Amino acid sequence: MEERPALVVAGGDGTLFHLLSRLVPPWPPVRLVPQGRGNALARDIGAGRAACVDVIRVSAAAAGGAALECFSLSSVGLGYPSDVTRGSFPLRFLRRFSYAAAALFTLPRWRWFRISLDGEAERRVRLRGVLVNNTRYTGGFEALPAASSSDGLAECVELSAGYVRQMAHNLSAISGLHCYAPARIRKIRRAVIAPEEPLELMIDGELAGPVQRVVLEVIPRALEVQVVRPASL
């Protein structure tokens, strides 16, 4: 089989999200020059290193009935993660600290979700938000030290902490101590998440509009990525 030429991409997780969603798999290898804010995937792989990473297939039903089909390399969120992401946009000049700064002004709110993980029976749960993450990093910091972008699994994080406990968790991640995690975390291959009222969908630091149902499936080791610049990750 003829080897496909590599693509050189300068940007972050959002740039990779837009690229993959416009190409037909199997994808060519990517040589990544990290220039984004969070750079979660680049940080997970490491400067100057290469890896075959998992890709999350995202199938969503928009509030207006339209279907969204795309791919994620780092994180997909509803509720609190989306609210923080929206708040981070005016703070882009702070780079990876923009998410932490936005969290200071974001109040986690209760929402009802229906969730099924890996084919299990659907649960109705009251949460502040849900985050499905493919790397150790989220919001620019290592929040999930046991995660890996190449293990065929994603971390499903069910967020229930209020403002004070969430800030304590954020400080724990920013400091690198990882001593406090007020959330239910589980490794999964597939998730079906349906908010009981349409919520804005966050994918790799981008917002995709209100959705009423999201199906996420991990495609193991589907993309070869090499971080080609020894950036200050």
Image: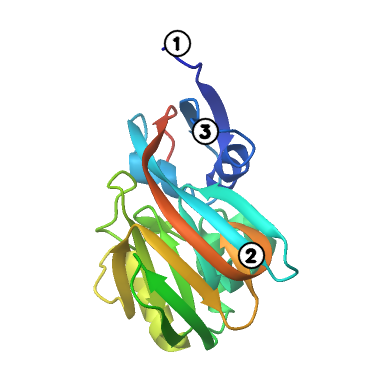
For badge 3, the amino acid type reads Pro
* Quarter the N terminus occupies: top left
**Tag on residue 135?**
none
**Mark number, residue 2:** 1
- Where disc 2 sits, the SS reads strand
The image position of residue 73, as x and y in percent, is: 47, 47
In the foreground, 90 or 206: 206
| Sequence-earlier tag: 2 or 1 | 1
Residue 58: image x %, image y %?
A: 53, 55
Res 143 → quadrant: bottom left
The residue shown at (53%, 46%) is: 13
Residue ID for mark 2: 61
Say which residue label 3 marks. 25
Taking depth in this image into account, of 205 and 218 the one nearest to the observer is 218
Q: Which of the two residues, 157 or 67, is positioned nearer the viewer here?
A: 67
Q: Tell me what residue is drawn at x 60 percent, y 65 percent.
A: 201
Q: Quadrant of the C terminus?
A: top left
In the picture, residue 94 is in which quadrant? bottom right
- In this picture, residue 107 sits left or right of residue 158: right
Which mark is first along the chain, 1 or 3?
A: 1
Please tell me whether mark 1 sits on a helix, a strand or a loop. loop
Examine the rendering and report whether any part of residue 84 can be seen.
yes
Q: Hey, what amino acid is under mark 1?
A: Glu
